[in-house]
Amino acid sequence: MGIELSVIWFVIIVFATLMYIVMDGFDLASACCSARCGAAGIAT
């Protein structure tokens, strides 16, 4: 077998994650940060 099955799954998972972030409009990181900062009582 030329390519390991685990490598194929890794590529699929990374691709799906990147597509989710891109389709979400790069809002994922800021939403996560806002939730953390808001829970900690830090003004955003």
Image: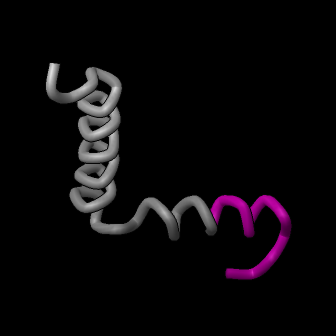
Expressed as whole percent of the image width and height from the top left, the position of residue 43 reads 75, 81
Q: Residue furthest left?
A: 2
Secondary structure predominantly adopted by residues drawn in magenta: helix
Classify the position of the N terminus by image quarter. top left
18 in relation to 9, above or below: below
Classify the position of the C terminus by image quarter. bottom right
Is residue 23 or residue 2 the one in the foreground?
Answer: 2
Expressed as whole percent of the image width and height from the top left, the position of residue 25 reads 28, 66
Expressed as whole percent of the image width and height from the top left, the position of residue 5 reads 27, 21
Q: Residue furthest front?
A: 1
Count of number-bearing discs: 0
Is residue 2 or residue 36 the one in the foreground?
Answer: 2
8 in relation to 44, above or below: above
> Would residue 33 be counted in the magenta stretch?
no
**39 sits to left or right of 1:** right
In this picture the colour scheme is: one colour
Which contiguous range is marked in magenta? 34-44
Residue at figure coordinates x 25%, y 61% from the top left: 22
7 in relation to 42, above or below: above
Residue at figure coordinates x 33%, y 57% from the top left: 21
**27 sits to left or right of 39:** left
In terms of image quadrants, where is residue 2? top left
Is residue 18 or residue 35 the one in the foreground?
Answer: 18
Residue at figure coordinates x 72%, y 61% from the top left: 36
In terms of image quadrants, where is residue 42? bottom right
Residue at figure coordinates x 27%, y 40% from the top left: 11
> Would residue 36 be counted in the magenta stretch?
yes
Q: Residue furthest bottom?
A: 43
**2 sits to left or right of 15:** left
